Amino acid sequence: MNIPATTNPRIVIIGGGFAGIALAKKLRNQKLQVVLLDKHNYHTFQPLLYQVATGGLEAGSIAYPIRKVIQHYKDFYFRLTSVKEIDTENQKIISEIGDLHYDYLVIATGSKTNYFGNKEIERNAMSMKTIPQSLNIRSLILENFEQAVILKDEAEKNALMNFVLVGAGPTGVELAGALAEMKKAILQKDYPDLNIDKMQINLIQGDDRVLSAMSEKSSKAAEEFLLKLGVKIWKNLRVTNYDGRTITTNTEVTFESATVIWTAGVQGAKVAGLKAESLVARVERIRVNEFNLVKGYDTIFAIGDIASMESEKYPQGHPMMAQPAMQQGELLGENIVRLLHKKEMKPFEYNDKGSMATIGRNLAVVDLPHYHFNGVFAWFVWMFVHLFSLIGFKNKAVVFLNWLYNYIWFDREGRLIIRPYKKKSFTTFTSDEI
């Protein structure tokens, strides 16, 4: 890896997400050598991925170069690589570009889409955890309409314009609202020779309400907003299979769709090499104690989505969201410094600042610890929080100007097929079909 030898303790961080970046900032300019590894050279602001997928924002506005974050930090190094395995006996990580010894290792690999073991759904559905995946969704949405406008077969055309979102958490709800707004204000202008009224947006939820992790008040408000926007909501329905064309469920209800976007769950993006007792197999998270120390090890920590800190209040670990990740990263930075100075570490206590979701123009829901509200004010709160959570002044300015433009003109400028994404089932047509 070409990392200089050092007499200072070496901290290796795997992952440049919310947790990894928060930790890196806390460890800056300490008497440490810090090495940050990630398979991308940028940090992604994941809460706005759905806007990239629906043309509201360009990818560069929600990404920030990791090297720019750390460029003024002393004895701090970044390497672009994927970690294949952890050699815990020899205290080294094995990556695609070589091995590296660590004194302390921090696993902050985040999460990935959970298909619950269904390989066919995994093969045929779309996921939205990264910028490349969001760009694929954007291309597929637009390609569907480009194909539909030239087809004569009504069944094929309807399948291309039927969008099915599986999972009504914040991602599914926000994506459904964005697609509904595209249908209402944009697609009918882009495709005047296509009956956009036939476009369907189906949101499937296995529970009895959308946004089940939020308050009942917010859940009810979000459902009402979605229904007004024309989204069809299917509750207490579970998808059992998707072959690329037909969606089957646990009931007699089926869907014919060229596009299924899976937002039904996430699991930890684990790294090989840890003991089985350190893992929660069902969700592939890593068990940690109150100091984020991996159980069974005294030099390995885990933070963020990958970490499962089980307690009476959080028996399955903290929610896999940005706030717990950032708070764990910040505290671990302090604790590592305390550890090296032979001081007692502070236990982690999650400060739940609330949760929120936006459904569309002037429509959002916000849950604070003691107050719940929705509507226009909630929408402004959502925008303010997300805008100021972005890294970098330029990104904040670009996103703000995009939102302002979109609000005034009710438009989405990012309707570009930069990187085509084709699904085999819907790319080859005979001359009789066109």
Image (tube, rainbow, N blue to C red):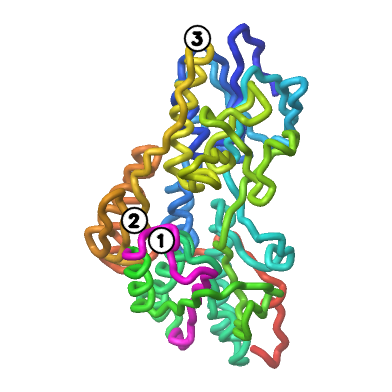
- Upstream in the sequence, badge 1 or badge 2? 1
Q: Are marks 1 and 2 in contact (CB under 8 Å)?
A: yes
Residue bearing the label numbered 1? 56
- Upstream in the sequence, badge 3 or badge 1? 1
- State which region is magenta: 193-217
- Pick out the residue farthest to the front: 312
- The answer to which quarter of the image holds residue 309 is top right
Label 1 environment density (alpha carbons within 10 Å; few <14, some 14–19, many ≥20) = many
Vertically, is 60 above or below 205?
Answer: above
Q: Nearer the viewer, residue 243 or 139?
A: 243
Residue at image position (63%, 9%) is 6
User: Can you give x and y, in whole percent of width and height, for residue 109 in the image?
Assistant: 60, 39
Q: Amino acid at mark 2?
A: Asn
Residue at image position (62%, 82%) is 251
- Pick out the residue farthest to the left: 377
Q: Are marks 3 and 2 in contact (CB under 8 Å)?
A: no
Element assignment for label 1: loop
- Upstream in the sequence, badge 3 or badge 2? 3
- Pick out the residue farthest to the top: 7
- Mark 3 → mark 1, Cα distance in angstroms: 48 Å
Looking at the image, is mark 3 or mark 1 nearer the viewer? 3
Vertically, is 191 above or below 140?
Answer: below
Residue bearing the label numbered 2? 402
Q: Amino acid at mark 1?
A: Gly
Residue bearing the label numbered 3? 341
Please say whether residue 203 is one of the residues in the magenta stretch.
yes
User: Can you give x and y, in whole percent of width and height, for residue 177 in the image?
Assistant: 40, 69
User: Can you give x and y, in whole percent of width and height, for residue 63 in the image?
Assistant: 47, 44
Please say whether residue 178 is one of the residues in the magenta stretch.
no
